[in-house]
Structures are given as C-alpha cells and as structure tokens.
Amino acid sequence: LTSPPYKGPIVLGTQPLGGAVDFNISHWIVEHRGALLPAARWVTVAGSTAVLACVALVIAARELRNRCRAQALGVLATSLTLVFFTCGLKVFVHRKRPPQSWWVADITGAIPHDWSFPSAHAAHAALVAGLLLVTMRPSRGARILAVCAAGAVGLSRLVLGVHWPSDVLAGWLLGAVASWILARCNARPTENP
C-alpha cells in the first residue's frame, strides 16, 4: 500500500467525508484483509442491484398471492426508488472512491468512473433485510440473521477496498430508512373499541 494516511481537509467529492478517520479505517482494513477476501468476494454479490431486484420480485409476488396488492406495490416502489435515489445521490455528491490500488478487481461492482457515496450495495442489503422483516414477520433468529447479512455486505465493500466507511454507513442508513417508510405505509391502523 503506497498511500500515506490522509491528513488534509474534509472536502466532499474528492476525499472521504470522514476525512482522516475514513481514510485510516479503510487503510487499516485493506492492510489486514488477507483471509477475508474470499468471503468478501461472495458476500458483496448479495448486495447487488440484481439480487435486490430478485428478492423484491419474489416478495411482491408473495404479497400478491396473499392478496396484499398495496404491500406488493409498496415493495416494488420502495426498491426502485432506492435504486434511483442511490444512483442520483452518487452523481450529486460526486465523491471519489478509495485509491484504485486498494480495489480487489473481480466481483466488486466498482468501476473507475463510478462514484463512491453512498454504497449502493450496503443500501440494497439493508433494504432487502428490511423487506424481509416488514413483509415476512420472521422469527427472532431470522431477524438477527437478516441484519447480520446486511452488515456483512457493507463490510465486504470495505474489505474489497471500493468504499469508505462513511459510504457504507450512509448506505445502511438509506436502506433502513426506506424499510421504515415501507413499514409505516403498510402499518394497519388499530381500531379503537
């Protein structure tokens, strides 16, 4: 690794939002990622747009089968909105990714002219976890597993060297907020006796 720790000012668009903290955390992860790379390559795929689309379609189909048309539409609308919102936010914020020398070239989803903030993989994974929690009402163990899986996707983006920690945190937050909005929209009002 040839890049020294970042010591400059925080400039949105050219440096990590968290400045030296973002840079130093990323630098440390890249230096110590050796054994984690095989798992990170596989886990990162779970946060891709293709996986989000498949899961959203399966959940929407399940909701239609259960005659919950509004919830099916909500799942699809939330998923599409998040995809377009993260893409738009990347273009608006215009933040560069970590140094390309840190990237693991295969299966990362990152391309040199693509922007970093927010992590779409982390956002999609958080939304998928949220969709499962909102629509399926799983057991406690399944809820924990869904949240851990979303966490692993975000962490895989750091291990692969293609995102700053604040990118991943923002992605998780966006996915969680999108899930919360869907849950609030689907909440059935309670009847007063």
Image (tube, rainbow, N blue to C red):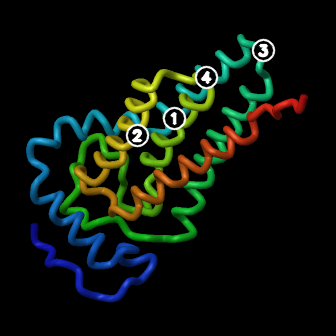
Q: Amino acid at mark 1?
A: Val
* Callout 2 secondary element: helix
> In the figure, is residue 49 to the left or right of 34?
right
Precedes in sequence: disc 4 or disc 2? 4
- Vertical placement of residue 122 versus 14, above or below: above
Residue lying at 10% horizontally and 66% vertically, measured from the top left: 1
For the residues labelled 3 and 2, the Cα–Cα distance comes to 28 Å
Residue lying at 51% horizontally and 54% vertically, measured from the top left: 173
Badge 2 vs badge 1, beta-carbon distance below 8 Å: yes
> In the figure, is residue 68 to the left or right of 96?
right
Which disc number belongs to residue 59? 4
Precedes in sequence: disc 1 or disc 4? 4
- Vertical placement of residue 25 versus 184, above or below: below
Residue named by callout 2: 150
For the residues labelled 4 and 3, the Cα–Cα distance comes to 12 Å
Badge 4 vs badge 2, beta-carbon distance below 8 Å: no
How many other residues sit within 10 Å of disc 2, few (<14), some (14-19) or many (≥20)? many
Q: Residue furthest top?
A: 65
Residue named by callout 1: 128
Horizontal and vertical percent position of residue 28: 15, 63
